[in-house]
Image (tube, helix red, strand yellow):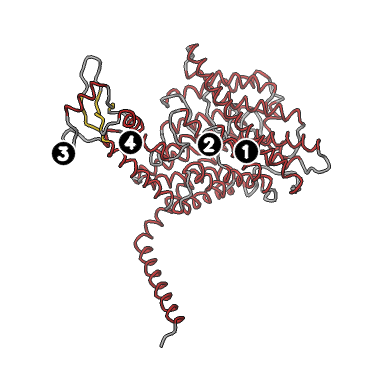
């Protein structure tokens, strides 16, 4: 007679054996394709890693040639000894070259960056524009080499996305696979740029894919590691920034100060973002009223940058020298505040001039300067209970960058990996959390999503807001020969009343019409001109639109939770 315990063990053994059989069956059926997919992810990671490496070294080489210095890490210090007219002319000619390239190879004269990669992941099955993307990479390369005041991560991310897009088209990847490969490329590019494998993987998931699906994690990590290996083969395992000494946080005493720094950093991030957008609007107004050709707009911006750089060469390029000085506390309060204000202005001019480049590195510099300024003031007011000002600079760097990117997790980790200092995590995390929470209430979640919102791409609110824009009414409507088609007479009556949809419209435009007109279907027509009657293409039924929308929502949810 068997005991209950023996019965339980026998059942457990049977379940374990059944699970093993199921596991072997999955490995046998899906294993080869999964291994193949990981191999493709590895190749994309290697390709994106080398692209990021060559982009970085190319910028250093061209900067060295243009400014005549052997060590571009100290470009700002060296530029002070150059003739003023040389500092002025370099960004002007660089802007002219950028303008001609973007005018020739893009439809709108804009350089592509992270925002377009996010849009590609959400709305275009992980694909981005390749022709415009290559032109944008070249334009950003010239901008960053000739005095533009932006960062290299934006162009590198988009360049990696172009690589993954080429692969997706070659293998005819579906939407889920395309997005996963895009995430692999982005992770490798970020990792290779900053020697930050953890942050690179999380950046791809948090910022670009905007979900943490388990199925995407393994290939993205593989690609991220590949990008890091490429970076370390060339540069070794050194961190991007070196702190003067290990810092200790006086937890109970200084924690309120880091809470306040988080709020201040959030406001600074909002000022940075809104200044860029206001400058872009102003530049467009000036261009329209003066009739300035769009290919000259970057050259004008280059002239403004050159004028500032004559007196303050710290705005030139990525700005890692100034960021390093802030993190080591080698700047005074007056210098810090001047450099921070000028960097915000310089970034706004560069971005508004359509010169290309990213916003991450500038936000690191502005954040480090903000944190140092806050630390200098705080430690002077409370000298007996304050730690080192450099810890405030580190926390401010992470807080401003996280608020700009809308990526608190990956930004916190990238700060640790850039500095190699994991002992100050509490200060950085507190500041990052508050800055991100505040900034996300004042803009559309992040700089990139606000960029897209300004172009009419509504990604900030989630899939429920942008999925409707992915369906054209012609793909969902019932044609006149459909057995369930709407009555032609009823359709023409509605057209004469002004209730109809153009064939190029999307469900995003159709749904409000259903709400206001209270109808079950809407005619879809093609408007052929003023003197020609419209052509009836079919009718969009409310129930069909809702069915397509629900299927898209279900597919998105399934992908994000798989």
Task: Measure the alpha-carbon separation of dots 4 and 1.
Answer: 36 Å
| Residue bearing mark 3 | 483
Confirm whether residue 246 shows in the render: no
Quadrant location of the N terminus in the rendered image: bottom left
Callout 4: helix, strand or loop?
loop
Badge number at residue 435: 1
Q: How far separated are the C-alphas under marks 3 and 1? A: 57 Å
Q: Mark on residue 261?
A: none
Calculate the distance from the C-alpha at mark 2 to the C-alpha at mark 3: 46 Å
Q: Which circle's residue, 4 or 2, is located before the other in the chain? A: 2
Which residue sits furthest right? 384
Q: Residue at x 62, y 21 (%)?
A: 306
Asked if labels 4 and 3 touch by Cβ distance under 8 angstroms, the answer is: no
Local crowd size for mark 2, using a 10 Å CA cut-off: few (<14), some (14–19), many (≥20) = many
| Residue 20 vertical position relative to residue 212 in the rendered view, above or below | below
- Tell how many labels: 4
The residue shown at (54%, 43%) is: 190
- For the residues labelled 4 and 1, say whether their Cβ atoms are less than 8 Å apart: no
Q: Residue at x 65, y 18 (%)?
A: 85
Q: Nearer the viewer, residue 258 or 192?
A: 258
What label sits on residue 445 in the rendered view? 2
Other-residue count near label 4 (Cα within 10 Å), few / some / many at <14 / 14–19 / ≥20: some
Upstream in the sequence, badge 3 or badge 4?
A: 4
Crowd class of label 1 (few under 14; some 14 to 19; many from 20; radius 10 Å): many
**Which tag is nearer the camera, tag 2 or tag 3?**
3
What separation in Å lies between label 3 and label 4 (alpha carbons)?
22 Å
Looking at the rendered structure, the secondary structure element under dot 3 is loop
> In the image, is 336 to the left or to the right of 487?
right
Residue position for label 4: 471
**Location of residue 551 (image quadrant):** top left
- Tell which circle, 2 or 1, labels the residue nearer the N-terminal end: 1
At mark 2, the secondary structure is loop
């Amino acid at each position: 007679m068997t005991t209950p315990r023996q019965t339980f063990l026998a059942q457990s053994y049977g379940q374990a054996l059944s699970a093993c059989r199921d596991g072997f069956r999955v490995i046998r059926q899906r294993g080869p394709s999964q291994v193949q997919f990981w191999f493709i992810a590895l190749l994309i990671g290697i390709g994106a890693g080398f692209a990021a490496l060559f982009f970085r070294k190319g910028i250093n080489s061209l900067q060295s040639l243009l400014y005549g210095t052997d060590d571009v890490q100290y470009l700002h210090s060296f530029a002070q000894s150059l003739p003023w007219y040389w500092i002025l002319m370099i960004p002007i000619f660089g802007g002219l070259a950028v303008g001609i390239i973007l005018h020739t190879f893009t439809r709108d004269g804009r350089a592509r960056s992270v925002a377009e990669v996010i849009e590609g992941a959400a709305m275009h099955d992980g694909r981005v524009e390749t022709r415009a993307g290559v032109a944008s990479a070249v334009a950003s390369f010239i901008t960053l080499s000739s005095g533009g005041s932006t960062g290299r991560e934006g162009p590198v991310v988009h360049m990696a996305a172009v690589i993954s897009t080429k692969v997706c088209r070659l293998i005819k990847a579906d939407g889920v696979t395309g997005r996963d490969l895009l995430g692999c490329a982005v992770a490798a590019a970020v990792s290779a740029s900053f020697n930050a494998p953890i942050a690179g993987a999380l950046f791809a998931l948090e910022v670009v894919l905007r979900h943490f699906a388990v199925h995407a994690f393994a290939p993205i990590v593989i690609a991220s590691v590949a990008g890091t290996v490429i970076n370390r083969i060339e540069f070794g395992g050194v961190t991007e920034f070196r702190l003067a000494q290990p810092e200790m946080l006086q937890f109970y005493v200084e924690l309120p100060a880091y809470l306040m720094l988080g709020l201040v950093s959030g406001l600074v991030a909002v000022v940075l973002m809104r200044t860029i957008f206001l400058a872009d609007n102003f530049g467009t107004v000036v261009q329209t009223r003066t009739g300035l050709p769009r290919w000259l707009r970057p050259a004008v911006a280059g002239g403004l940058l050159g004028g500032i750089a004559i007196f303050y060469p710290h705005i030139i390029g990525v700005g890692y020298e100034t960021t390093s000085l802030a993190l080591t506390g080698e700047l005074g309060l007056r210098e810090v505040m001047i450099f921070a204000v000028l960097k915000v202005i310089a970034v706004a001019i560069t971005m508004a001039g359509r010169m290309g480049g990213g916003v991450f590195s500038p936000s690191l510099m502005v954040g480090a300067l903000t944190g140092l300024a806050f630390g200098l003031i705080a430690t002077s007011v409370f000298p007996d209970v304050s730690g080192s000002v450099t810890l405030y600079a580190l926390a401010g760097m992470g807080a401003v960058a996280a608020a700009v990117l809308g990526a608190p997790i990956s930004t916190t980790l990238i700060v640790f990996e850039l500095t190699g200092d994991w002992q100050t995590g509490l200060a950085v995390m507190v500041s990052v959390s508050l800055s991100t929470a505040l900034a996300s209430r004042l803009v559309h979640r992040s700089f990139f999503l606000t960029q897209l919102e300004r172009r009419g791409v509504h990604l900030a609110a989630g899939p429920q807001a942008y999925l409707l824009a992915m369906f054209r009414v012609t793909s969902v409507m019932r044609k006149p020969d459909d057995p369930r088609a709407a009555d032609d007479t009823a359709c023409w009556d509605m057209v004469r009343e002004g209730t109809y949809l153009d064939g190029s419209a999307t469900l995003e435009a159709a749904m409000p019409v259903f709400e206001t007109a209270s109808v079950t279907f809407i005619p879809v027509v093609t408007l052929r001109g003023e003197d020609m009657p419209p052509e009836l293409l079919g009718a969009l039924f409310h129930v069909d639109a809702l069915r397509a929308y629900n299927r898209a929502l279900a597919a998105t949810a399934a992908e994000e939770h798989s």
